[in-house]
Amino acid sequence: MIFQSQYYKIAQYGLAWLCYAILHIIVISNLVQLPTSALIVQGIIFSFILSSLGWLLRLIMQFGQYDELPILRQIINYSLLAILFVGIGVGLSSWTIYLSFGEIIFKTLLPTIPIQAFISLLLYVILLQYFKSSIQNKKQMDDLHEEQTEIPTPELPANFEMIDRISIKTGQKIDVIAVSDVFCLQAYGDYVLVFTESGKFVKEQTMKYFEEHLPRNQFVRVHRSYIVNVEQISKIELYEKQTQQITLKNRLQIKVSASGYKALRQVLGL
């Protein structure tokens, strides 16, 4: 069922861009006089490039966590993404037309570039809002499931050894990070993102492993996707209704589940 749902969404996405390609061809044909073959190729290429950029935009938003950054950083990041989206979309499609049909057809299309740039920017804003809403809805569903399902605390032997450092291999380099320098850990598919003052590191390990091996008086699993270092918490506040939000010293904000907040209160002695 999950794979069927994914294929259905991909088919919907592709169909929407096919409809846009047809609309794009009609609009451009009313602006300039071009051979039908050039119009069709330009419309299909332009739509394909923007659809690919849109898919990349979704992945960036899903894993980049831009909404958890300060407002100014969000504005800068989203503005840079808009410039890249428009620049790559218009530039790459124009370059392809130049290579395919030559300079004469390319010069004929030049007056439409500002319109294509405006359309690209408009599509970027639409996709941005759609993906933000989709990701937010998914997070809300995960949070609801989180509240309904208690996170079990693993029962470990009394002599179970805790780790005091995390070794991360990146290419030929190995970074050794003291656990006291870790702000938090985030689930990242089959991997874990380790947040430190010097940046994010990808560790090929599971959240369960770190939940079991990190010091329990210092690290708390506040959400299925997050384990935080309580010594790096700068603020805990009400986010919405009965949901709490943690702000870490690196300004990262993390929503806390009901069971995670209960565990956090126990560690903090609240």
Image (cartoon, rainbow, N blue to C red):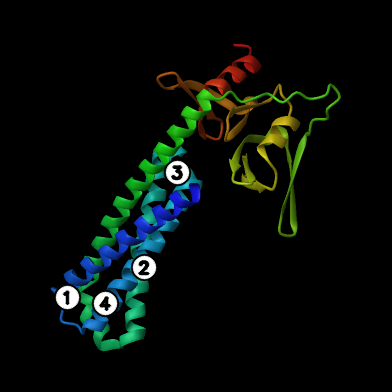
| Disc 2 residue crowd, few under 14, some 14–19, many 20+, Cα 10 Å | some
Inspect the image, locate mark 1, and give the three-letter code of the amino acid beneath it: Ser
Element under disc 4: helix
- The residue that disc 2 covers is 48
Q: Which of the two discs, 3 and 1, labels the residue nearer the N terminus?
A: 1
Q: Is residue 114 visible?
A: no
Q: Which disc is residue 269 wearing?
A: none
In the visual, does 198 lie left or right of 14?
Answer: right
Separation of marks 2 and 4 at Cα, in angstroms: 12 Å
Q: Is residue 24 above or below residue 249?
A: below
- The residue that disc 4 covers is 40
- The residue that disc 1 covers is 29
The furthest residue to the front: 1
| Disc 1 residue crowd, few under 14, some 14–19, many 20+, Cα 10 Å | some
Inspect the image, locate mark 4, and give the three-letter code of the amino acid beneath it: Ile
Separation of marks 3 and 2 at Cα, in angstroms: 26 Å
* Residue drawn at (48%, 43%) of the image: 65
